[in-house]
Amino acid sequence: MLDSLRVFTGNANRPLAAAIATYLGVELGDADVDRFGDGEITVKINENVRGCDMFIVQPTFAPGDNLLELLIMMDAARRASAERVTAVLPYFGYARQDRKDQPRVPITAKLVANLITTSGANRVLTMDLHSAQIQGFFDIPFDHLFAAPVLIQHFRNLAIPDLVVVAPDVGSIKMARAYSKRLGCSLALVDKRRTTKDQTEVMNVIGEVKDRNVVIFDDLISTGGTIAKAARALRKHGVREIFVGATHAAFNEETRKTLEDSPIREIVVTDTIPQQPELLGEKVRVLSVSKLLGEAIRRIHEERSLSSLFI
Ligand code: R5P
């Protein structure tokens, strides 16, 4: 086991990093992550980190400064002789372009993986990647957690009768199957087609949903268009109440209205991305994944297995 466990953060999600540090019983590391007059990022670690096991917590949702802060902090940590640097990305941004599925498009997930490794990360800890195979873009140890224990507990507590788990698109079927197994209910699928980068169209609903209550699970809600359209299609197919569970909430100003105008009753998201209360609206509840991430950090530090965190 390495000597001293330290948790640092940039400005992307300080409340989550503070909650993780509290869980671990350590102080958040002292670092200035600031701006020069022209907006460039400047970092200064204000304590000795030589020989330390350093965890830098920073979700990389837009703007790109969040990613840049992480990269620059890792560069500072490596140059300050930290023994091991773990990039902790509660939300791994730029993951949606993960393959070349059209001519002349980038693979941003691979680009970000290269940047993280080059900046000095010795390992990565993240949660609910857009696609699990992004792990293969790294050649350093990579731990991929799921928010499922937190979301499942919530829906178990609600004890919703006649429940069906719904995957909002083909890409999330594997995740939805895991949720349905753990909630002990059946599975249905919304057949979605992406028409533009931010627009989708529902083609069909596959599975028995009439007169049932449903919970849609997704990795990410951004504009809210995907789940709002899925919810409307499900309503047309005779569904009773509609619930949603999603790990990451990258809301914009339009999302609240889209969700409020939808037939969804409740939406549960986590705090991997910090939320502005005015963008959330009445239907959205935020649960914390700080204990899950904190426990994973503790076990990585103590060289213990993470397996039981997946149950
Ligand atoms: C897509 O494949 C993802 O899993 C999400 O369904 C999607 O990114 C959500 O985006 P939006 O809320 O903008 O429809």
Image: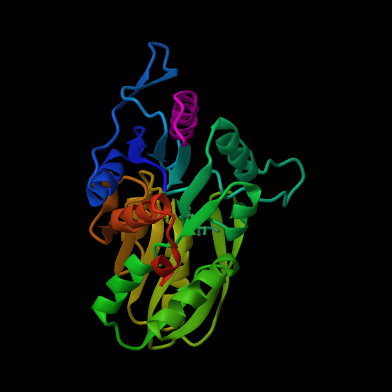
* x and y percentages locating residue 284 in the rendered image: 28, 59
> What range of the chain is rendered magenta?
64-83
* x and y percentages locating residue 5 in the rendered image: 34, 42
Q: Is residue 74 magenta?
A: yes
Residue 125 visible: yes
- Residue at horizontal 32%, vertical 45%? 274
Kindly indicate the quadrant of the structure image that contains residue 242.
Answer: bottom left
In the image, 254: left or right of 233?
A: left
For the C terminus, give its image quadrant.
Answer: bottom left
Considering only vertical position in the picture, is 222 above or below 18?
Answer: below
Kindly indicate the quadrant of the structure image that contains residue 288.
Answer: bottom left
Of residues 233 and 2, which is closer to you in this image? 2
In the image, 43: left or right of 189?
A: left
The residue positioned farthest toward the right in the image shown:
103
Secondary structure mainly formed by the magenta segment: helix
Considering only vertical position in the picture, is 69 above or below 275?
Answer: above
Considering only vertical position in the picture, is 32 above or below 111?
Answer: above
* x and y percentages locating residue 127 in the rendered image: 45, 55
- Residue at horizontal 35%, vertical 21%? 34
Of residues 60 and 197, which is closer to you in this image? 60
- Residue at horizontal 56%, vertical 50%? 141
The tally of labels here is 0
